[in-house]
Image (tube, coloured by chain):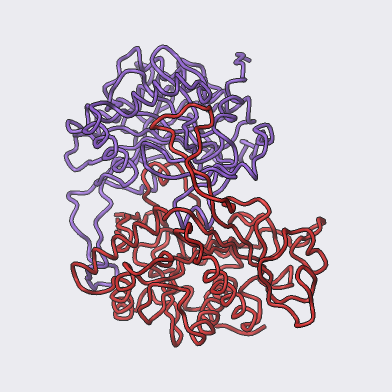
Chain colours: A purple, B red
């Protein structure tokens, strides 16, 4: 009998379809794409002029903006989904007619690319830990810079790794989206967590950490400040959440020690993916409270969600919002836990 | 400036990212896969024993069940996501521990496969119209049979066409899922439509049809009883909705004339995909009121949603629930409208 599981944070149901389960080992894959391309990479040293001018960089002291010798470089996305604008007025409907069924507004905001390192080849799993610390610091710096904009209602940081996970440029990078609205997914989490806090007086994520520690089966690894596990109602095989142990709604308030430790556990988790599953494509996103987070500071808990792109969403998932997951989270976690890191 | 559009039915926002727009022509594709395989197809004549025993078939008068010479054959999915069970009790958590964070229940229900025809090759776009009429009739017959089960809270019918849209077997088929819960996606539509009806005294979908007729730009085609268009807040390039013109919440109550006409417009729309876009993979699902639909009969309006699988969901879409669509629905509809059907 397949099993329906309910995610406590989102309230979404997931089918754990044991009847069609395969062993976790069967998901180990060959690399999908060769990283060598013939086109010029706009994110490599020497090609800085191919991107819009940088908005921030960590670089050698005596180098000017948009030259080489940077460690981290942040540039606006050349094809932005959200772009700066004077204001955020409703747009007329495309046809020129207006209708209550044609609500529209300018996609005002920011869409930035955080180039992970000068290396065209090395993904987060393969970069030295020190470099991942710089990436996490860049996340925080850009978050703090953009949250000052009064029009910004939410900031999302993501990584798409691998072509089939949506990475259109191979040179490893993150993307930051600063949005003029609070999107549905984080909104649902925020509201459910607020309701839980109102009813129980506690943070749902803090309780989940306690529960996962007790049950053990879904734990992948933990560090001084963080905890990585496969969530109970995992939507896809090997879905992984990284939670700070300290209650904290807002990512941008992490300490320097937490920055370093986040880089460590993130890298370790992605090395488990890399080594156990054969460098699968994956999506990563960071869910945190909105910039003006006072209302959520007690009830919400920022975190990272990671999805190896192994199965695909089809008609059932699109028509219901219910994912079908063919690997039990307990088995997925056990498989990833079995990974022993070697620096090679 | 990219544009944010709000879907009136779901309330979901979509980014129409004009900055990264390509012309509709650029989505025309080569076929993704060769349909010739070496494995034995369980859906072809002579291989009836390879599926679970049929639950229904339209077949020649003097043939027995699970033999050849059928026109339509319906069988339980061999690897069901939902399976019959005596009752639907909560399952204990996988670890044996129970916790408020580990809600689970048996995935009780039905998961059936509707084999479109004896042809291993011909998809809905290429079958004769008469055969598509039989498929629509099979949808209705199975819907009526399964809605009698008191445990069933929702029935979803889907088509996954093409490997990258999730079709694991090439022989064209639909799938029917009968579920022990009302899933989030149809629930949201039902509730928003009910609220609209309460406020305005009218069906939102009926009003959308009127609006689309007035605006014209997003219309693809219409038939006597149906209307096909690209919705205002299309989530992906060439997303298409097929709506009955007659207000009707429940698919299973369509008339024989509507059955025939639905087959006609569905086939015509899919032929537009096939000929204009080069047989893209797609997902189709049918949204209708739940089996016990009295509450929704005035406010809801059954319909079909179609998604060519052209772009993919990545970190941004997963982390926000907001889709980025790179083709304006008005351009997509214009492109599909330009298709002139020839029976060849």
Q: Closest to the observer: B280 or B286?
A: B286
Measured as percent of width and height from the top left, residue B259 is found at 52, 81
For the N terminus of chain B, give its image quadrant. Answer: bottom left
Instruction: Examine the image and state in which quarter residue B43 appears.
Output: bottom right
Q: Closest to the observer: B317 or B16?
A: B317
Measured as percent of width and height from the top left, residue B31 is found at 66, 62
Question: Is B238 situated above or below B39?
Answer: below
**Residue at 50% over, 29% down:** A230
Question: Is A221 situated above or below B23?
Answer: above
Measured as percent of width and height from the top left, residue B223 is found at 46, 85
Measured as percent of width and height from the top left, residue B62 is found at 79, 81
Q: Closest to the observer: A139 or B81?
A: B81
Instruction: Pick out the residue farthest to the front.
Output: B86
Question: Is A211 situated above or below B154?
Answer: above
Instruction: Examine the image and state in which quarter residue B173 appears.
Output: bottom right
Left/right of residue A170 with respect to residue A293 in the rendered view: right
Total marks shown come to: 0
**Residue at 40% over, 56% down:** B185
Left/right of residue B266 with respect to residue B102 in the rendered view: right
Instruction: Examine the image and state in which quarter residue A90 appears.
Output: bottom left
Q: Closest to the observer: A276 or B3?
A: A276
For the C terminus of chain B, give its image quadrant. Answer: bottom right
Q: Would residue A168 be visible to someone looking at this image?
A: no
Q: Would residue A52 be visible to someone looking at this image?
A: yes
């Amino acid at each position: 009998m397949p099993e329906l599981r309910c995610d406590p944070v989102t309230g979404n149901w997931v089918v754990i379809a044991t009847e069609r389960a395969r062993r976790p080992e069967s998901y180990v894959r060959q690399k999908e794409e060769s990283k060598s391309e013939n086109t010029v990479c706009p994110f490599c040293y020497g090609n800085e002029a191919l991107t819009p001018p940088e908005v921030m960089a960590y670089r050698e002291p005596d180098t000017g903006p948009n030259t080489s010798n940077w460690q981290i470089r942040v540039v606006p996305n050349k094809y932005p989904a959200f772009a700066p604008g004077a204001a955020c007025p409703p747009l007329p409907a495309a046809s020129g007619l207006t209708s209550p069924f044609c609500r529209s507004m300018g996609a005002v905001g920011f869409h930035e690319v955080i180039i992970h390192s000068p290396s065209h080849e090395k993904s987060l799993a393969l970069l030295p830990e020190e470099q991942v610390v710089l990436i996490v610091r860049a996340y925080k710096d850009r978050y703090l810079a953009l949250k000052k904009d009064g029009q910004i209602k939410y900031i999302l940081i993501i990584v798409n790794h691998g072509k089939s996970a949506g990475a259109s440029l191979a040179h490893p990078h993150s993307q930051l989206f600063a949005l003029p609205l609070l999107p549905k997914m984080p909104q649902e989490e925020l509201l459910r967590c607020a309701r839980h806090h109102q009813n129980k007086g506690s943070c749902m994520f803090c309780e989940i950490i306690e529960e996962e520690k007790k049950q053990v089966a879904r734990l992948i690894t933990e560090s001084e400040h963080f905890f990585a596990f496969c969530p109970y109602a995992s939507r896809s095989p090997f879905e992984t959440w990284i939670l700070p142990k300290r209650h904290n709604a807002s990512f941008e308030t992490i300490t320097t020690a937490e920055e370093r430790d986040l880089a460590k556990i993130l890298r370790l988790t992605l090395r488990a993916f890399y080594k156990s599953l054969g460098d699968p494509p994956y999506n990563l996103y960071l869910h945190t409270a909105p910039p003006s987070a006072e209302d959520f500071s007690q009830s919400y808990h920022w975190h990272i969600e990671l999805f190896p792109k192994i199965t695909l969403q089809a008609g059932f998932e699109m028509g219901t919002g219910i994912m079908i997951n063919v690997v039990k989270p307990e088995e997925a976690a056990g498989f990833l836990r079995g990974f022993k890191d070697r620096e090679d």
